[in-house]
Amino acid sequence: MNLRTLFAIPIITILVVTLSLAGMLAGQGWSGQAQGQTASLAVERMRLLLELQTSLRAERVATNLALGKPYPLPDAVRRQLDDARRETDLGIGAVAADFTARNAGEVDAAISEAYLTTVLVRLGAARAMVDALIARGQNGRTFAALDTVMPRLLVAAQPLDEPLEQASLTVTRVDASLSGLVILNRLAASLRDELGVIAAVLLPRFDNAEQPTGADLETVRISLARTSFLTRVLGDTIEIAGATEPIRLAFRDLRAVDTNGIMSRLKELANPATPNAYAEAGPLPVQLLLVPWGERINALRGAIVNTVVQRVTTQRAQRERRFDLGMAAIGFILVAVLESVILLGQRVVRPLAELGLAITRIAAGDRSVALSPGSDAREITEMVTAVETLRQAALVADATVRRHRMAARQRMLALREALGIVQSVREPAHVLERGVARLSEGIAATIALVTTPTTSPPPTLGAAAAAVRVGLAEMRESAADLDAMFAAAGSAQTEDRPEAEFVAHILAVQAQVDRRSEAVRGFVQPSLVALRDTASATGGVSGPVLRDLVSDQFARIEETVAVIAAMAAAVSRAAAIVRDLPLDDTPMAA
């Protein structure tokens, strides 16, 4: 495992962990954004459905007003009815467009096509019946017919309750903290339904200029009691649900409605003792109370839905902001990690890798590349400086080794030369031995020549003969050793041997030559004296022969001295070469 791989392992681990955290955060963020978008779509649908319900109620109010007027309708009444219907159609169109957009975007719609179709069919039928009743004129409108129209208009709006409930459930699934506001909206919707019941009972009577019956009053009383109960529940729940100031203001306006006054006024109108009380009542005071009451209920629901929209929008924005901040933090971490990787790679890993390669080259013997600090890090600079110092020391050691090897080669050449010189005395050694042998024979012949019955050889001649024999025996005794030394020296010349072996061969041959030189010195002087004494003996018939024989021995002694001198000079020259060799200094370890 190299340095780059070792460095890459923790970096990859950090990146994997960071990317995993980024994936988790992104998954949670996208899930939260999807939930926020779902809640926003559901709240938007709630708003559209609530506006459509408000438009339908405004159309019911305009329709009730028109049914109480003679035909043809006054322009103001006709215009109010047409405007109300137009607003209702626009609301239906907005819901239909929202439905189409959600399905196109594969979003789970809170409303189905069946609900919208039901609203359109029922509303169309109710409008047709209203138009037919208006065309009959005020005298042709019976209570039974009028009593049928208002429930039909109420029934036309009922299909919107289910998708509104589904949208509310969607909102609470996404954010349970909005459950209180959703409950407030449901209570307000129940209050609106009770008001619709009151309107469905009373308005047909008023449109037909009839007094309410006892059954009508009982139904209204029950509905008013329910509205009072629902209003109290709203008051108890409003703070728990986390209501805002607009909701509190709308609820304060709603509680200001005098429901007791409505019931008292209805009892007066239904009193048999005052049959003309309705005709004298003026401009429909009960309707004037019901209409603002319904508007206040719608205002409360609108405030609730607007609060839900605001909270959902705020929470979605917060989720998106948290998601953006989280992703920005992850991005910053990734950038920081990558920047750290780049910096560490340039400032640490690459210099260390180059340093490792340089150390490998130096260890392999390549000291040619100088090192320079490639990083600002003090520790790496110190390491590079240390390795450069080692490289310089290695260069010095290499130079020392080369100098040592050159000196060793020079010494080896000198030793081979010296060994070759001592080997040159091999043949002279044999010549020396043969010459000494002939000298010994010549002296013996001289002794035999001068020895007669009347004369005897000089005493010095016998001593010389003995000295020559001793020297010859000395040479012959060491001849085998000398030949072995020459053979070993010859092998050393053709093979790589230690320097000490070369020196040993040279010194051994020198010792043998010195031994022979000593032997020659032992018999040369006695032989010269003996031959001189013998040569002085000129008497007898043997005089000329003796002189020739003595002359030959003198020549052999001269030859022996010359040979041993040449041998001594050769080994002395070889010994001088060995003595003058340079010292073998030990090189530094590279």
Image (spheres, rainbow, N blue to C red):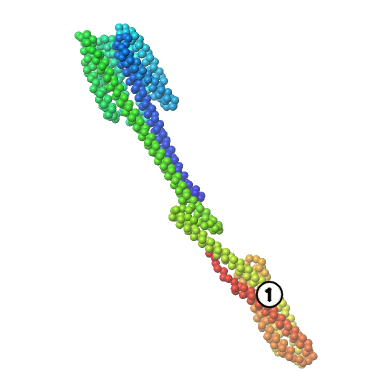
What is the quadrant of residue 524 in the picture? bottom right
Q: Nearer the viewer, residue 503 or 189?
A: 189
Point out the residue furthest to the front here.
Answer: 75
Q: Is residue 351 left or right of residue 43?
A: right
Task: Please give the count of numbered marks on the rendered protein.
Answer: 1
Task: Reply above or below: 528 against 304.
Answer: below
Label 1, residues with CA under 10 Å away: few <14, some 14-19, many ≥20: many
Please say whether residue 363 is visible from this viewpoint.
no
Residue at the image point whose x is 57% and y is 65% from the top: 403
Task: Reply above or below: 110 against 351.
Answer: above
Task: Reply above or below: 245 against 267.
Answer: below
Residue at the image point whose x is 22% and y is 9% from the top: 276
Q: Nearer the viewer, residue 523 or 233?
A: 233
Point out the residue furthest to the left here.
Answer: 273
Point out the residue furthest to the right here.
Answer: 541
Please say whether residue 375 is visible from this viewpoint.
yes
Residue 207: percent from the left, percent from the top? Answer: 28, 11
Q: Nearer the viewer, residue 264 or 172?
A: 264
Task: Reply above or below: 338 against 583.
Answer: above
Residue at the image point whose x is 42% and y is 27% from the top: 107
> Which residue was labeled with disc 1?
425
